[in-house]
Image (cartoon, rainbow, N blue to C red):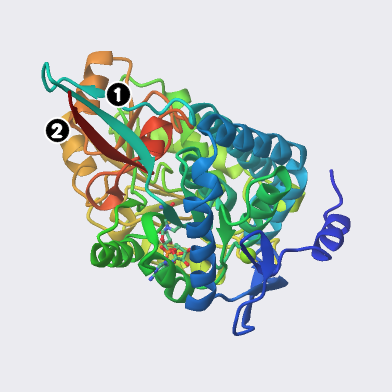
Amino acid sequence: MTDHRHFNAELAGRLPDRHFIDGAWEKSANGATFETIDPSDEEVLGEVSRGDASDVDAAVRAADRVQRGAWRRLAPAERGRLIAKLADALEADAERFALMETLDVGKPIKESLGDVRGVCATLRYNAGAADKMEGATIPLGFDTIDFTMLEPVGVTAHVVPWNYPLGMVARSVAPALAAGCTAVVKPAEQSPLTALAFAELCRKVGFPDGVVNVVTGYGEEAGAALVSHPLVRGITFTGSIETGRKIYANAAQGLKPAVLELGGKNPMIVFDDADLDRAAFDALDGAFGNSGQVCSSSSRFLVHRSLREAFVEKLATGAAKLTVGRGVDNCDLGPLVSEEQYGKVFSYLDQGRSSDARLRLGGGRPKDLGKGYFVAPTVFDGVDPGSRLAREEIFGPVAVVMDFETPEEALAIANGLGYGLVAGVYSQDISRALSFARDIEAGSVWINGWFIGGVQAPTGGIKDSGIGRERGLPGIRNYLSIKNIGIRL
Ligand code: NAI
Ligand code: MG
């Protein structure tokens, strides 16, 4: 096991603490900074620049200049080559990135390393697609030729959350670059470090200055200034519904397209003919991976009444074996990202304890841990489908189990919320599973597995879970505008 104190000190000497604008490290124009915290011991990890509208303006202008200049003239295959080089450079530097992520947000090193590998895959997919986004010819008639050109929309804004800080940057920046756009990223204030290191790596592998910029700071300051900047022509956001609404209102003022991914309350529906071992095993990862801070987590379990007790037993037994501790010690669950998130999750634990739900495991802090925002894996059984626990996104390691009798009842509960990101169905009856997949209101449906997907498969929500799709070729089309060209012969 790596000695994290050694790494910590080594990293501390060169933690990025400034914005990355136009290929250079820049202090905030007003000199302001804020602290980023290690959530596993609540200690300050470092000072980071607190950007506002003037820093954002500098970044957007730089991105606009190079987009209209050198970046626009670079052949798509050459853009792809640069993105592929970035993947190679990141792979070679994976351990440093993973450690930085772990220190900043608390997640276990093994998860951070997995995230970095996922980012490499994302980069490579988009690198390969850069010269394959083709327009169409349109049959208008004998004396006319009509065709479409796909053009980059221009400067794009990327407002990202803290649960997968690097992963969320790559998910939208890689396709934007593949499409020929330039990017200004506003990382979450809880987790600014890897985005900065990513931008620095872009410079190292040869991206022109200004193609990838990062302005750190708070949402209401840097984030709001970014999405409302007149030179920004496309917005991608992942985070809460509340902030998504603000950003969409902002986008409406500027008549800009926005892709919004706003989380979920994703039902895993386990039928009486399900492979119970598989469902319970997947539920462990689905509910407790990244300490439950995942938009696509299995955040409510709807289990047929005949299997509920056996399912809960398996889930609680498995969850009791999960270790909780500092990310650098590579436990199964790290701390939650922040004091705020810790408080939010505790308010749900309090609500669950004071309700009729049965607490089967956890329900508070692990006893052996002093400082840090740790929450033990928790299982609530017999939860009232009308309660907050069953209806709201908790974003913590809290499994919420309910039961049902008929498929109609399961469907009504599943579709009864505003959310519509992911749903999962466990059944050996393919016809039943596919009927459910058809009728469930969600952007993705997973059958007999959880977290099925990858950079190739589009993801996103319906209803309150958001607008638009990321990943896959649809993820690149977000950053392309169709120009139609007609020629009279
Ligand atoms: P948030 O949605 O407020 O923050 C996400 C990003 O938006 C951050 O970079 C933040 O600085 C920025 N932001 C905030 N206000 C903004 C504004 N007015 N204009 C532009 N940018 C702005 O989410 P927060 O407060 O960190 O977490 C609250 C809850 O949101 C979580 O408990 C969880 O339920 C949900 N969430 C969902 C995520 C997902 O993957 N869908 C990720 C993170 C949080
Ligand atoms: Mg932090």
The amino acid pointed to by label 2 is Glu
Kindly identify which numbered label has been placed on residue 272: 1
The residue nearer to you, when weighing 127 against 294, is: 127
| Image position of 90 (left or right of 240) | right
Element type at marker 2? Answer: helix
| Image position of 112 (left or right of 288) | right
Q: CA distance from mark 2 to mark 1?
A: 14 Å
Q: Is residue 361 visible?
A: no
Determine the residue positioned at 17% across, 23% down. 489
Q: Which residue is mark 2?
A: 408
Do the residues bearing badges 2 and 1 touch, measured as CB atoms within 8 Å?
A: no
Q: Furthest residue to the front?
A: 489
From the viewer's perspective, is residue 85 above or below residue 138?
below
The residue nearer to you, when weighing 317 against 153, is: 153
Residue 459: x, y in percent?
Answer: 37, 37
From the viewer's perspective, is residue 469 above or below residue 102?
above
| Image position of 397 (left or right of 470) | right
Q: Mark 2 or mark 1: name the one nearer the start of the chain.
A: 1
**Count of numbered circles on the image:** 2
Kindly identify which numbered label has been placed on residue 95: none
Q: Quadrant of the N terminus?
A: top right
Disc 2 versus disc 1: nearer the observer: 2
Q: Quadrant of residue 366?
A: bottom right
Element type at marker 1? Answer: loop
Determine the residue positioned at 51% across, 33% down. 76
Q: Quadrant of residue 460?
A: top left
Determine the residue positioned at 25% across, 53% down. 464
- Name the quadrant where ligand 2 sits: bottom right
